[in-house]
Image (spheres, rainbow, N blue to C red):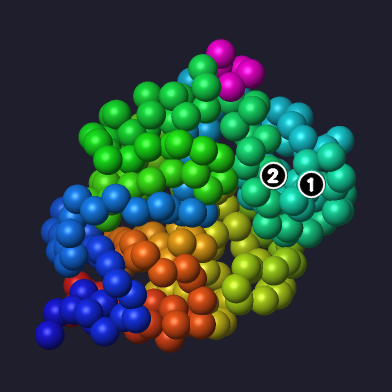
Amino acid sequence: MMALDLTEAWPVDRVSAGWITAAGATAVVGADDAVFALASVTKPLFAYAVLVSIEEGTLGLDQPAGPEGATIRHLLAHASGLGDDPSSPLSPPGRRRIYSNAGYELLGSQLTAASGIPAGDYFREAVVEPLGMGSTELTGSPAHGAVSTVVDLLKVAAEWLAPTLISEVTMIDARSPQFARLPGVLPGYGRHDPNPWGLGFEIKGTKAPHWTGTTNSPATFGHFGRAGTFLWIDPAAGVACAALTDRDFGPWALPLWPALADAVLAEVTD
């Protein structure tokens, strides 16, 4: 049995899943052209557009943004102190890892103001079109409003394994812990100390349990979404894996997602 065949037993009506290696080998199960809501998998995709804007000079990574003392870097790394209310920070910047949709919506506003281009259009021009992601669209919030297919997610995963739209130096920074020792809650998995996060990417580090596999390296980065979606990249193994479903994240996913990750890594790196 192939690793991706494990998804046949998932308690969902529809699933598309796939993996890709740094060498370009791929495998996909399910309808490769089926469009799903990404939920919070939107965040790293939109963050990549922000990184493009930073390299273009439209935004500055350490320019002020959000609460007093916060920067674009803080917003990308969920370290600004914002929670759900953009007008009422829960913590001073750089003190706690507080997962914040409001922070990403503020990033969208900052990008629009600096570029003069609506955030969704900038995202399309900076990321979607150059990577040929023809079924991906940001139709709502930069925090959770994109739709995509598994094939398109594998295209962006290949980009993150070997960047072409930004420099390798910027990509390494993006997948490295920012404000590295901050504690905080990983939604769905509880409090971790530390709770490492990069520039748009959640980083596995020493977190356990985790939504990736037990054999994923600590350097694994990516994101999962409330819509039952995930995308992870393990740079140590040179492998990425994505899955899209029509069932919200919940207890059903806790054993099944890591089992798939371990099976994919065993199959691809054997």
Image quarter of the C terminus: bottom left
**Residue furthest top as drawn:** 116
Q: Is residue 219 above or below residue 169?
A: below
Which residue is at a point 46% across and 24% down the rendered structure image? 122
The one nearer the camera, 266 or 43, is 43
Type of amino acid at the residue the image marks with label 2? Ala
Q: Earlier in the sequence, mark 1 or mark 2?
A: 1
Q: Secondary structure at mark 1?
A: loop
Residue 9: x and y in percent read 26, 84
Quadrant of the rendered structure where residue 58 is? top right
Question: Looking at the rendered structure, which numbered label has been put on residue 85?
Answer: 1
Type of amino acid at the residue the image marks with label 1? Asp
Specify few, some or many for label 2: CA neighbours under 10 Å numbering under 14, 14-19, or 20 or more: many
The one nearer the camera, 130 or 164, is 130
Residue 86: x and y in percent read 78, 41
Give me the C-alpha separation between circle 1 and circle 2: 6 Å
Which residue is at a point 76% across and 29% down the rendered structure image? 64
Residue 161: x and y in percent read 32, 51
Quadrant of the rendered structure where residue 197 is? bottom right
| Residue corresponding to mark 2 | 102
Q: Secondary structure at mark 2?
A: helix
Which residue is at a point 47% across and 74% down the rendered structure image? 211
Magenta highlight range: 112-116
Q: Is residue 114 magenta?
A: yes
Q: Visible in this render: residue 52?
A: no
